[in-house]
Structures are given as C-alpha cells and as structure tokens.
Image (cartoon, rainbow, N blue to C red):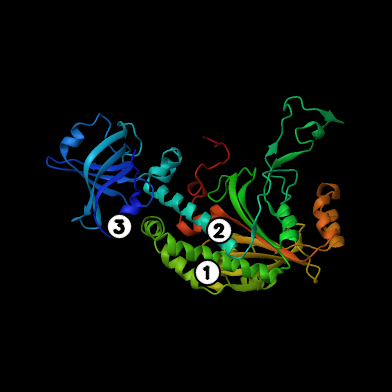
Amino acid sequence: MSKRIAIKTLLAENQPRLSVKVCGWVRSVRRAKEVSFIALNDGSCFASLQLVVEPQLLADLPQGLGTGACLSVRGELIASPAEGQSWELQVAEVELLGGVDEAFPLQKKRHSFEFLRSIAHLRPRSNSFGAVFRMRSQLSFAVHQFFHQRNFVHVHTPIITANDCEGAGEMFRVTTLDPQQPPQIEAKVDWSEDFFGARTGLTVSGQLQGELFATAFSDIYTFGPTFRAENSNTSRHASEFWMIEPEMAFCDLAGNCDLAEDFLRHMVGYTLEHCAEDLDFFDQRIEKGLINKLQGLYKAEFHRVSYTRAVEQLQTAGQNFEFPVNWGSDLQSEHERYLTEKIYAGPVFVTDYPKEIKAFYMRDNDDGKTVAAMDLLVPRVGEIIGGSQREERFARLQQKMAAQGIAEGDLDWYLDIRRWGSCPHAGFGLGFERLLMYLTGMENIRDVIPFPRTPGHADF
C-alpha cells in the first residue's frame, strides 16, 4: 500500500506533483455531466482539498458516496483555476473505503452546538470541532514547550488519592466495597477493608504532590486530568477536566505572578503564530474580534493590585452591582470583569486575599488577616489563573490545619516537607478547558473537551 499524503502537506506545496495518494472524508459532492467536484478533508487542517473527478470514475463506485463517506484517491496535483484555493487533485483512481446513507446526521453545513453535543462521536468531523480539537492538540504541545524551555520537570501526579486538596468534599469516591453492605465499625464504613485500605477518590488537584517534587527538583509542573463531583450544569463546569499546575521552590508571590504572566502570554502568542487558519475560523464564525482580543492581551500590561485596594476601587466606582462588594467576601464575576474592563482596561492580578476565604496551604501574611494568594483576571472572563505562595513554616501550617479541622495524620507527608529542608515555594493552577474557551471564543466547556463528563452524562 503506497503512503498517503496529508492534505495540509499538499496545500502547502510550491509545485505540481504527478502522482499522489490522499485519503479522507467527503465534505461535499457537486455532480455535473462532464466533471464532478468533491471536497475532501482528512483533519490535518481546516481547508479541504478539491477533487476533480470524471463521471465514469464515480459511476463505477458502489452505493454510498455522499457527505461523510470515506475515500482513497490517487491523482495529479495541479494548480487550481478556482478562486480561494491554490491546488486541486485531478483524480485518476478512486476507492470508496466507507460509504454513507441518508441517515448520516452531518448533512447540513451548519448545526447547533447543542445538536452536535448529542452526537459527540461524530462532531469531530464538523468544521467547528475539527478546529477546536486541532487547537487543543497544538496548545497541549505549547504547554509542555513553555515549561521545557524553562527546565521544569514534568511530574505525573496520582489520579487516585486519599487527599482532598481543595477541602470542599467534592471528590468522586473510588471503592471496591459493596455499596449495599459495606464493612462497618461503630456504625461507620470501615475503609481499612477497601482496596487501598483507606478512603480514596479521584483527584481534584495535583498540587500537594507537586509540592513534594518541587522540594527536590526546584521547578516542576503537572498537566493531567482532575475531577470534581460538583452537581453543576453551568457552561463553565465539567466533572472531568485538565489542569496545568506548576510549583516552584525558592519562589514568592511576586515570582509566581511573573511566571503566570509569562505563561499566559506564551500561550496567546503561540496561538496567534501557529493556529492562524483555525483561529481565523473562530474569529469569523464564533467570536467576532477574537484575533484583536488576543493580540491586545499579548501586548497588554499586566497590572497588580491588592484585594483590599480592589475592594476600595469597586466600592467607590459608583456601579450598581448585583452582589454587594464587601471586604472579606470573594469577588464575583461581575466584580472581576469590572476591574479588568473598566478600571484597568486589561489583565490584572489581584493579590493578598482574606485568609478566611482561601485554602489552608496558603502562606499567612504579616498583617494576620490576609494570605499570599493571587488570581489573574482577564477581560470578558474574569479569573483564569489562581495560585499562591505556600505556607512553608512548619508550626504555622500545623496551626492552620488545626484551625480548619484537618487531622495531621491525614497529611503527615505534607508536613514532612516543612519539617525537613523546608523552603519558600509557590505555584498556580490553570484549567486547560477554561483557557481553550478564552482562546477559541467557544462559550461552553462541553465544546472544548472531546467527551464531556457532566452530571447525568458519561457516554462513550
């Protein structure tokens, strides 16, 4: 079997080719008496290759040629006289690898995203999702490229864990115990009889384990699946998603902000440079002005303001917010967007949040009221990155855990890295799907992950 050539490669050619083999799926068929035109796409790029086919070649095919059919063709790559395309394939041989019938659900050129979610197994063949998942692949590479260039060590943290990093109790339980009759001690489930000998669940974050490796390798990052058993059906929540979480030893909050800024700027710049064709589609069909938005963010100054100062600015803005702005309460999306769109007209780091609304592992500031936390807010979205300097002081971390009712025995290994050879360290987390939504203009998280897992939906 001769080797096929990707359509992306052919469309980038600078001279004709006498004999090439192409395989792909039919996007459209236009039949005429003297010649037929087929648009063939193999997923390697957004554009399709036009096939010019004599009627007799199609007449010899079995039934099933139509939108969605799979073809293998051989022919001559020639300059195309048609506007908008450089090359077309003058077909000499055609083979129908997989036919279709009238029930194939992607017959129309435009379908709603809601309909396409109902056929998630076929939606990658559509223009919109072809573009989404090519960009997802490209940007996955860009994540690793960024950290590799900075000598970060990539760590695979566990998916199954006995620790709830966020402390919200929204973990999916992992167990082999009989759900109807689990072993019990004093009317409570005896988790020592379970497979791992302890109560375990799917991870909500790789941060805590990442901190362990940072105290050995200095700079590390994790990039893997995380899970939240939160019964939420919003357009921004999924039960399974991917998180990017760097952790840096010998780093404070300012250094953490520096890396977050560099990282987001790198991802935006990579998108503009390497995803132009798909990005142009999103700019035209999904979010008008998307490219200008990304170019603006790439060049923008990243402002920094304390939470206390941000609250003062919001309270004196003269804006009637749905949720009142009070010191000690978390900022709502409307507050975050007002800061980025009206007050700073660009991205802004909000730092030093009240300790009562942040996690136990965040470092206490000297004022006794706040912790060294940061959120990066961007226009039109609000928070896109969240992180902190970690509490590296053994006694202080013990106190914080006790105050929040966290048993030391559950996190003795976490305390150990403060007990022996502790150092200042910091890190942040970025939801990969949230980033993809921002970079593509897609408005629903279900549309930037191949097979979305949400309450009531776990198909395939």
Q: Residues within 10 Å of mark 2 (few under 14, many from 20)?
A: some
**Residue 115 appears in which quarter of the rendering?**
top left
Query: Given the image, on which type of amino acid does mark 1 rest?
Result: Glu
Return the disc, 3 or 1, that comes first in the chain's sequence: 3
For the residue pair 85 and 312, the one nearer the viewer reads as: 85
**Residue 12 appears in which quarter of the rendering?**
bottom left
- Direction front: furthest residue: 1
**Residue 393 appears in which quarter of the rendering?**
bottom right
Query: Given the image, on which type of amino acid does mark 2 rest?
Result: Val
Q: Which residue is mark 3?
A: 13
For label 2, the SS is helix
Return the disc, 2 or 1, that comes first in the chain's sequence: 2
| Left or right of residue 62: residue 399 | right
| Left or right of residue 372: residue 344 | left
- What label sits on residue 143 in the rendered view? 2
In the rendered image, the vertical position of residue 251 relative to residue 31, given as above or below: below
